[in-house]
Image (tube, helix red, strand yellow):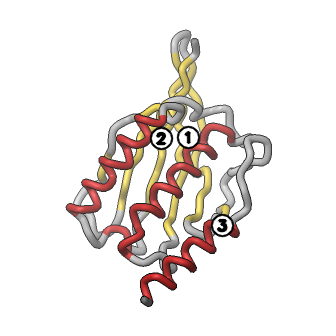
């Protein structure tokens, strides 16, 4: 029954979070507290060509899952990454990162960084694939979500057509 009350608390946190809309997002170098995670734009630079722009826009994410029971980590991550993709699409602090992103996981408990596939954040199927790939990584590295040194970075690019 304790798991049920913790789940209700987790759901209450999500329910009480301020709603993101496309016209009120500003994430820059200051940490933004979204209850279940912290996010900031760590670096933002663009190299343009006629076909595409390489946007070195790193979003740094730190998870805050202390109120989430382990059996609900994946549900929490789905919520978190759905919000992060939305933030990346509509962040008024940058014009980058509206198309493709790559996720990189680093932590003291990892021997090497983990680079996941590049996805189109506007494509819900791509987003689901990334979450499935992340789920596989977490099955192989079960303690990763509780590692306080875990940093999730998103590198983004923008197509010019």
Query: Where is the C terminus found, in terms of image quarters?
Result: top right
Cα distance in 3D space between marks 1 and 3: 30 Å
Q: Residue at x 61, y 55 (%)?
A: 40
User: How far from the left and from the top, in percent, is residue 35?
Assistant: 62, 70
- For the residues marked 2 and 3, what is the alpha-carbon distance in whole angstroms? 29 Å
Label located before the other in sequence (2 or 3) = 3
On the picture, is 55 further left or further right than 71? Answer: right
Residue 15, numbered label: 3
Q: Residue furthest bottom?
A: 2
Q: How far across and down, in percent of the image, does residue 80 sit? A: 53, 57
Mark 2 near mark 1, Cβ–Cβ under 8 Å? yes
Within 10 angstroms of label 1, few (less than 14), some, or many (20 or more) residues? many
Q: Nearer the viewer, residue 67 or 150?
A: 67
Q: In the picture, which quadrant includes the N terminus? A: bottom left
Which residue is at 66% across, 67% downward?
15
Q: Residue at x 48, y 73 (%)?
A: 65
Dividing the picture into quadrants, the one containing residue 13 is bottom right
Local crowd at mark 2 within 10 Å, few (<14), some, or many (≥20)?
A: many
Q: Which mark is residue 155?
A: 2
As measured in the structure, the alpha-carbon distance from the residue carrying label 2 to the one carrying label 1 is 5 Å
Residue 93, compared with residue 67, is above or below; it is: above
Q: Earlier in the sequence, mark 1 or mark 3?
A: 3
Q: Identify the mark at residue 57; answer none if there is no mark.
A: 1
Residue 112 position, x and y percent, is 25, 56
Q: Is residue 5 above or below residue 74?
A: below
């Amino acid at each position: 029954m304790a798991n049920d009350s913790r789940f209700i608390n987790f759901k209450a946190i999500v329910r009480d979070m301020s709603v993101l809309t496309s016209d009120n997002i500003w994430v820059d170098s200051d940490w933004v507290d979204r209850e279940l995670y912290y996010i900031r734009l760590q670096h933002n630079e663009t190299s343009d060509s006629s076909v595409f722009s390489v946007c070195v826009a790193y979003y740094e994410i730190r998870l805050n899952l202390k109120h989430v029971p382990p059996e609900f980590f994946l549900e929490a991550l789905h919520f978190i990454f759905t919000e992060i993709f939305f933030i990346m699409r509509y962040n008024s602090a940058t014009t980058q990162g509206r198309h493709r992103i790559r996720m990189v996981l680093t932590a003291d408990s990892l021997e090497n960084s983990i680079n996941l596939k590049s996805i189109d954040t506007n494509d819900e199927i791509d987003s689901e694939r990334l979450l499935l790939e992340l789920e596989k990584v977490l099955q192989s590295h079960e303690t990763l979500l509780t590692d306080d040194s875990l940093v999730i970075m998103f590198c983004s690019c923008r197509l010019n057509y």
